[in-house]
Image (tube, rainbow, N blue to C red):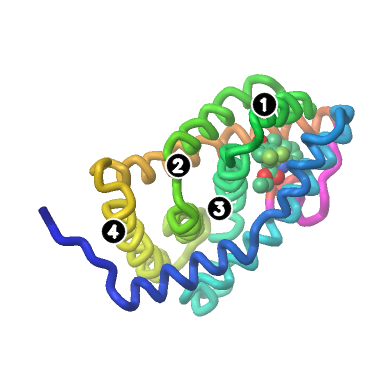
Amino acid sequence: KEKVEITKEQQALMKVIADAYNRHQIPQDVAKKLLQDQYSAEENFLLLTEMATSQVQVLVEFTKNIPGFLSLNHEDQIALLKGSAVEAMFLRSAQVFSKKMPNGHNEVLEDRIRRSGISEEFMTPMFNFYKSIGVLHMVQEEQALLTAITILTPDRPYVKDQQAVERLQEPMLDLLRKLCVLQHPQKPQYFACLLGRLTELRTLNYYHAEMLTSWRMNDHKFTPLLCEIWDVE
Ligand SMILES: CCOC(=O)[C@H]1CN(C(=O)c2ccc(F)c(F)c2)CC(C)(C)c2c1[nH]c1ccccc21
């Protein structure tokens, strides 16, 4: 039975990542707005684009706090952000969605999301992902590290210095592995499970690209920031 312990510098890294993650909480008020009143599909869609836009701003702020990120090549910083934005959105969506809400609220929220002008075929893989994240009952630190690990994926398109990104991602993976052993001693496969979710997350990139084309058909409008990060228009 290996004795797992978190070193001093790993504790420092955990604090930096967790603080950055908590400081940039998505305003849950958009989810509350969606829950409050019955809006039209157009209004739901507008709320969701507002939510996505603020999440991208939050993502950029969080990423800037990842130790070493700002020392990466500038083009690579952009490539990592653009390459991970959709995955980070779905990861955060899953976390917002699986937050314990008063009973019945999750169903109402799911219903509102389903009726926001998005074709049904994308809903199934999306909600399956939310449920597979929900059952893990991740703690905040795990969510923060998993988001940082997603952002620091070396093989994103157009990344030139992949080794530099690996050097930043590896300590996060090592820290997450230790955290999983300490937080979930009864689940030795928990860390492997988390990484499996990152693979599932990548498939949502595909569905998102498909969603975008179907939204463009129904001339849905996006904010300039979303057009930039989602490569629309
Ligand atoms: C955290 C930032 O997430 C988003 O912005 C997602 C939110 N999405 C959710 O499922 C979701 C999860 C929990 C909630 F509480 C909630 F309200 C929504 C996914 C999706 C419907 C695909 C979407 C988002 N933004 C869009 C903009 C235009 C069209 C579609 C979306």
Magenta stretch bounds: 219-229
**Residue pointed to by mark 1:** 104
Measured Cα–Cα span from mark 2 to mark 3: 23 Å
Counting from the top left corner in percent of width and height, residue 7 is at 28, 73
- 229 vs 116, left or right, is left
Pick whichever of labels 4 and 2 is earlier in the sequence.
2
**Disc 4 or disc 2, which is closer to the eye?**
2
The image shows residue 81, relative to residue 66, as above or below, that is above
Residue 224: within the magenta?
yes
Counting from the top left corner in percent of width and height, residue 87 is at 56, 46
Pick whichever of labels 2 and 3 is earlier in the sequence.
3
The answer to which of 44 and 226 lies nearer the viewer is: 44
Measured Cα–Cα span from mark 3 to mark 1: 32 Å
Label pair 3/1, CB-CB below 8 angstroms: no
User: What residue sits 31% from the left and 47% below the top?
Assistant: 184
User: What residue sits 37% from the left and 45% below the top?
Assistant: 195
**Residue pointed to by mark 3:** 84
Pick whichever of labels 3 and 4 is earlier in the sequence.
3
**Residue pointed to by mark 4:** 178
Which amino acid is tagged 2?
Answer: His
Q: Under tag 3, what secondary structure?
A: helix
Mark 1 Cβ and ligand 1 under 8 Å apart: no
**Residue pointed to by mark 2:** 137
Residue 163: within the magenta?
no
Which amino acid is tagged 1?
Answer: Gly
